[in-house]
Amino acid sequence: MTALQAALEAAARLFGPCEITQVLGPAVARISAHGGAEYVVKKHADRDKHDREVHAYQHWTPALGSSAPQLVAADAQALTIVTTALNGHPYPGPLTVAAHTTRPGRSCAASTTPSSLALSRATATGYETALPTGPPAPGPS
Protein backbone atom coordinates (compact mmCIF):
# COMPACT_ATOMS: atom_id res chain seq x y z
CA MET A 1 0.00 0.00 0.00
CA THR A 2 1.40 3.43 -0.93
CA ALA A 3 1.48 6.34 1.50
CA LEU A 4 -1.23 8.07 -0.51
CA GLN A 5 -3.49 5.01 -0.35
CA ALA A 6 -2.93 4.79 3.42
CA ALA A 7 -3.79 8.47 3.85
CA LEU A 8 -6.98 8.08 1.81
CA GLU A 9 -7.94 5.01 3.85
CA ALA A 10 -7.47 6.98 7.10
CA ALA A 11 -9.64 9.81 5.74
CA ALA A 12 -12.33 7.33 4.71
CA ARG A 13 -12.47 6.04 8.30
CA LEU A 14 -13.25 9.60 9.43
CA PHE A 15 -15.56 10.85 6.68
CA GLY A 16 -16.81 7.80 4.82
CA PRO A 17 -16.21 7.50 1.08
CA CYS A 18 -13.72 10.10 -0.17
CA GLU A 19 -12.44 11.00 -3.59
CA ILE A 20 -8.99 12.36 -4.40
CA THR A 21 -9.45 15.63 -6.28
CA GLN A 22 -5.76 16.59 -6.51
CA VAL A 23 -2.52 14.78 -5.70
CA LEU A 24 -0.24 17.30 -3.99
CA GLY A 25 2.70 14.99 -3.34
CA PRO A 26 3.63 11.34 -2.84
CA ALA A 27 1.82 11.26 0.51
CA VAL A 28 -0.46 14.32 0.31
CA ALA A 29 -3.78 14.77 -1.47
CA ARG A 30 -6.73 17.11 -1.57
CA ILE A 31 -9.91 15.10 -1.08
CA SER A 32 -13.62 15.62 -1.41
CA ALA A 33 -15.75 13.98 1.28
CA HIS A 34 -19.49 13.32 1.35
CA GLY A 35 -21.40 16.56 0.79
CA GLY A 36 -18.52 18.15 -1.14
CA ALA A 37 -16.41 19.21 1.87
CA GLU A 38 -12.75 19.64 0.83
CA TYR A 39 -9.83 18.53 3.00
CA VAL A 40 -6.13 17.82 2.67
CA VAL A 41 -4.90 14.46 3.95
CA LYS A 42 -1.23 13.73 4.62
CA LYS A 43 0.60 10.55 5.65
CA HIS A 44 3.86 11.15 7.52
CA ALA A 45 6.91 8.94 7.02
CA ASP A 46 7.81 8.83 10.72
CA ARG A 47 6.48 9.58 14.21
CA ASP A 48 8.73 12.61 14.82
CA LYS A 49 7.51 14.48 11.72
CA HIS A 50 3.90 13.58 12.53
CA ASP A 51 4.16 14.77 16.13
CA ARG A 52 5.91 18.00 15.12
CA GLU A 53 3.27 18.88 12.53
CA VAL A 54 0.36 18.02 14.83
CA HIS A 55 1.92 20.23 17.51
CA ALA A 56 2.26 23.11 15.04
CA TYR A 57 -1.37 22.79 13.93
CA GLN A 58 -2.62 22.61 17.52
CA HIS A 59 -0.55 25.46 18.93
CA TRP A 60 0.43 27.86 16.13
CA THR A 61 -1.97 27.85 13.22
CA PRO A 62 -5.01 29.00 15.24
CA ALA A 63 -3.19 32.34 15.65
CA LEU A 64 -3.06 32.68 11.86
CA GLY A 65 -6.85 32.36 11.53
CA SER A 66 -8.20 31.78 8.04
CA SER A 67 -4.74 32.33 6.51
CA ALA A 68 -3.69 28.81 7.51
CA PRO A 69 -5.36 25.43 7.30
CA GLN A 70 -6.82 24.08 10.54
CA LEU A 71 -6.28 20.58 11.89
CA VAL A 72 -9.45 18.50 11.52
CA ALA A 73 -8.08 15.12 12.68
CA ALA A 74 -4.82 13.39 13.54
CA ASP A 75 -4.41 9.63 13.57
CA ALA A 76 -1.31 8.87 15.65
CA GLN A 77 -1.40 5.18 14.82
CA ALA A 78 -1.62 5.73 11.04
CA LEU A 79 0.66 8.84 11.20
CA THR A 80 -1.94 10.73 9.19
CA ILE A 81 -3.41 14.22 9.51
CA VAL A 82 -6.43 15.83 7.89
CA THR A 83 -6.64 19.62 7.56
CA THR A 84 -9.09 22.06 6.09
CA ALA A 85 -8.36 22.90 2.46
CA LEU A 86 -7.65 26.49 1.53
CA ASN A 87 -8.77 28.04 -1.74
CA GLY A 88 -6.16 28.44 -4.42
CA HIS A 89 -3.42 26.27 -5.81
CA PRO A 90 -0.07 25.22 -4.35
CA TYR A 91 3.00 27.14 -5.48
CA PRO A 92 4.41 25.14 -8.43
CA GLY A 93 8.09 25.40 -7.53
CA PRO A 94 10.36 25.03 -4.53
CA LEU A 95 9.57 27.34 -1.64
CA THR A 96 12.38 29.86 -1.44
CA VAL A 97 12.64 33.46 -0.30
CA ALA A 98 12.01 34.45 -3.93
CA ALA A 99 8.71 32.53 -3.86
CA HIS A 100 7.53 34.68 -0.95
CA THR A 101 8.51 38.04 -2.47
CA THR A 102 5.53 40.03 -3.71
CA ARG A 103 7.44 42.54 -5.85
CA PRO A 104 10.95 42.58 -7.30
CA GLY A 105 13.41 44.06 -4.86
CA ARG A 106 11.25 43.50 -1.77
CA SER A 107 12.45 41.10 0.87
CA CYS A 108 10.39 38.27 2.30
CA ALA A 109 10.18 40.16 5.60
CA ALA A 110 8.57 43.12 3.87
CA SER A 111 5.75 41.02 2.43
CA THR A 112 5.07 38.51 5.19
CA THR A 113 3.32 38.91 8.52
CA PRO A 114 5.33 38.44 11.74
CA SER A 115 3.19 35.43 12.65
CA SER A 116 3.81 33.61 9.38
CA LEU A 117 7.54 34.36 9.57
CA ALA A 118 7.65 32.90 13.08
CA LEU A 119 5.76 29.82 11.89
CA SER A 120 8.19 29.36 8.98
CA ARG A 121 11.21 29.66 11.29
CA ALA A 122 9.67 27.36 13.89
CA THR A 123 8.71 24.58 11.50
CA ALA A 124 12.14 24.72 9.86
CA THR A 125 13.92 24.20 13.18
CA GLY A 126 11.45 22.18 15.24
CA TYR A 127 8.85 23.59 17.56
CA GLU A 128 11.03 25.44 20.06
CA THR A 129 10.10 28.92 18.75
CA ALA A 130 6.81 30.46 19.87
CA LEU A 131 4.68 32.85 17.86
CA PRO A 132 4.98 36.51 18.79
CA THR A 133 2.29 37.92 21.03
CA GLY A 134 0.58 41.27 20.80
CA PRO A 135 -0.63 43.20 17.77
CA PRO A 136 1.09 42.62 14.44
CA ALA A 137 3.72 45.09 13.33
CA PRO A 138 2.52 47.63 10.75
CA GLY A 139 3.09 46.49 7.19
CA PRO A 140 4.86 48.43 4.45
CA SER A 141 2.95 51.25 2.76
Image: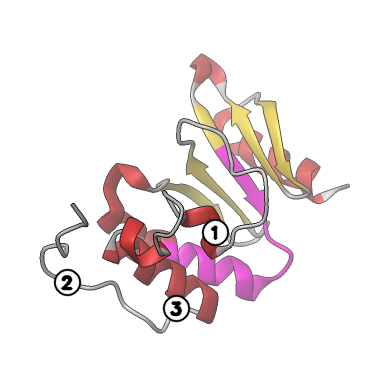
Disc 2, SS: loop
| Extreme residue in the front direction | 105
Q: Which mark is residue 57?
A: none
Give the residue type that dot 1 points to: Ala
Disc 3, SS: loop
Which percent across, then down, holds residue 6?
Answer: 76, 46
| Extreme residue in the bottom direction | 128
| Extreme residue in the right direction | 1
- Closest to the camera, between mark 1 and mark 2, is 1
The answer to which image quadrant residue 58 occupies is: bottom left
| Extreme residue in the left direction | 135
> Residue drawn 59% across and 44% down?
91
Instruction: Determine which residue is flagged by label 2.
Output: 133
Q: Which residues are magenta?
A: 40-56
Magenta stretch contains residue 15: no
Q: Are marks 1 and 2 in contact (CB under 8 Å)?
A: no
Whichever of labels 3 and 1 marks the residue nearer the N terminus, that label is 1
Q: Alpha carbon of mark 2 to alpha carbon of mark 3: how far? A: 16 Å
Disc 1, SS: helix
> Residue drawn 39% across and 48% down?
68
Instruction: Determine which residue is flagged by label 3.
Output: 127
Label 1 packing within 10 angstroms: few (<14), some (14-19), many (20+): some
Which percent across, then down, holds residue 120?
Answer: 45, 67
Q: Which mark is residue 98?
A: 1
> Residue drawn 48% across and 55% down?
100
In the image, residue 71 sits, relative to residue 18, either above or below, namely below
Q: Would residue 116 be found to the left or right of residue 96 on screen? A: left
Q: Nearer the viewer, residue 87 or 101?
A: 101
